[in-house]
Image (tube, helix red, strand yellow):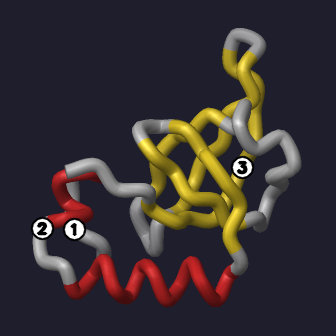
Amino acid sequence: MCLGIPGRVVEIHDDAGLRMATVDFGGIRREACLSCTPEAGIGSYVIVHVGFAITLVDEAEAHRTLDVLRAMSGAVEGELGEALP
């Protein structure tokens, strides 16, 4: 299963010419490429799919979606490698 998971951008940096971010998914942090979301900044909420931030989402929707994903035992663990806290 492939999910787009919402997270908050906590850091932005350049990696070999690519705009990259550290994204916090409710306590789990992973790297994501921001090339598809150039308007994203620190504090923005993005939907991440296979390592790419594919769209922006508002904070309320991000939290609501994370709550739903927490209720889906194992779904997020398959994508992030660990369960959401």
Neighbor class of circle 3 (other Cα within 10 Å; few <14, some 14-19, many 20+) is some
Q: Is residue 43 above or below residue 1?
A: below
Which residue: 22% across, 68% down?
83
Q: Is residue 79 above or below residue 59?
A: above
Which residue: 72% across, 20% down?
18
In three-dimensional space, the C-alpha distance between marks 1 and 3, rounded to whole angstroms, equals 22 Å
Name the residue that disc number 3 marks: 11
Q: Is residue 25 above or below residue 22?
A: below
The kind of secondary structure element at disc 3 is strand
Q: Amino acid at mark 2?
A: Gly
Comes first in the chain, label 3 or label 2: 3
Q: Residue furthest left?
A: 74
Where does the C terminus fall, quadrant-wise? bottom left
For residue 37, what is the image quadrant? top right
Q: Amino acid at mark 1?
A: Ala
Comes first in the chain, label 1 or label 3: 3
Label tally: 3
Task: State the image coordinates of residue 8 (x, y, percent, origin top left).
Answer: 63, 65
In contact (CB < 8 Å): disc 1 and disc 2: yes
In three-dimensional space, the C-alpha distance between marks 3 and 2, rounded to whole angstroms, equals 27 Å
For residue 38, side relative to residue 30 (left or right): right
Comes first in the chain, label 1 or label 2: 2
Using the image, tell me which numbered label, if any, was put on residue 72: none
Task: State the image coordinates of residue 54 (x, y, percent, origin top left).
Answer: 61, 46
Task: State the image coordinates of residue 44 (x, y, percent, origin top left).
Answer: 76, 64
Using the image, tell me which numbered label, if any, was put on residue 83: 1
Using the image, tell me which numbered label, if any, was put on residue 74: 2
For residue 82, what is the image quadrant? bottom left
